[in-house]
Amino acid sequence: MIETSKLNGSRLLSSNIACQHCDFMMAEPQLQPGQVALCPRCGHKISRLRVNAVNELLSYSLTGLILLILATLFPFMSFTLNGNMMEITLWQAATEFYIENYKVLAFVVFFFIVLFPGLILMFVFSYVGTLILFGRRFYSPIIVSAIFGLLPWAMAEVFFVGVLVSLIKLTTIAEIGIGLSFWAYLLFCLCYVKVLSLIDKHQFWSWMDLAKKI
């Protein structure tokens, strides 16, 4: 078992890295908690060692997973027009496309707003939790690669912003009711965005190097 204080205060100086913005090669920075490393050429942020990042990653990722499950169990919102009321769930954001014969779009929407964000939180929680309890495992690099591979494809927050924009138009033509899933998904998005802000590629790989040496 690795103490979280060792992970929170660690940054190993291991190899050369390239700036993602301008490709400038530099030595991997050795940071103290709270410090930020910037590219000496373009000023792009290379890495940031956040204080207490391990505990926050565990708590926010687990909370986000619970909220995502709750968001799929209750009505998302309801529409009342001319005395007729219709409730929709989060699943119907994808299934309605499938029913209308937009099958590819249905799968894409489901993957982007539910599956991929949920997998990212699950992988983050399992990676950090496994690292603390058991140290580095043979599958740790696979999990980290999966996290950063899925990040560009998960668009939960984009979907929710789109829902908010749509509500502005819908309120002019129908009476809108907000369901429990709406609030659960809102809180899930907040947790998800918080986890994204804590994810640092160089820190994740550095934790594995540290676990191997302890």
Image (cartoon, rainbow, N blue to C red):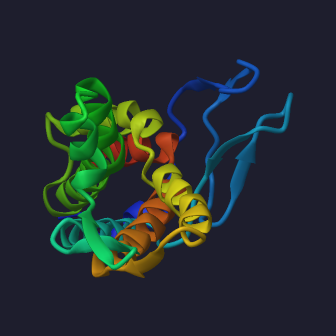
Query: Is the residue 128 above or below the residue 145 in the image?
Result: below
Using the rendered view, name the quadrant where residue 29 is placed: top right
> Farthest residue toward the front?
82
Using the rendered view, name the quadrant where residue 99 is placed: top left
Name the residue at 36% across, 69% down: 185
Question: Can see residue 63?
Answer: no
Q: Residue 196 in the image: state x and y as whole percent.
A: 48, 54
For residue 72, side relative to residue 78 (left or right): left
For residue 37, side relative to residue 77 (left or right): right
Name the residue at 49% across, 65% down: 194
Q: Quadrant of the N terminus?
A: bottom left
- Disc count in the image? 0
Query: Is the residue 114 above or below the residue 25 in the image?
Result: below
Question: Can see residue 104?
Answer: yes
Closer to us: 200 or 155 = 155
Name the residue at 23% across, 31% down: 142
For residue 34, side relative to residue 166 (left or right): right
Query: Is the residue 150 above or below the residue 3 in the image?
Result: above
Closer to us: 156 or 90 = 90
For residue 61, side relative to residue 95 (left or right): right
Q: Residue 160 in the image: state x and y as whole percent.
A: 48, 59
Name the residue at 54% across, 68% down: 173
Closer to us: 119 or 85 = 85
Q: Residue 33 in the image: state x and y as whole percent.
A: 59, 65
Closer to us: 164 or 203 = 164
Q: Residue 95 in the image: state x and y as whole percent.
A: 21, 44
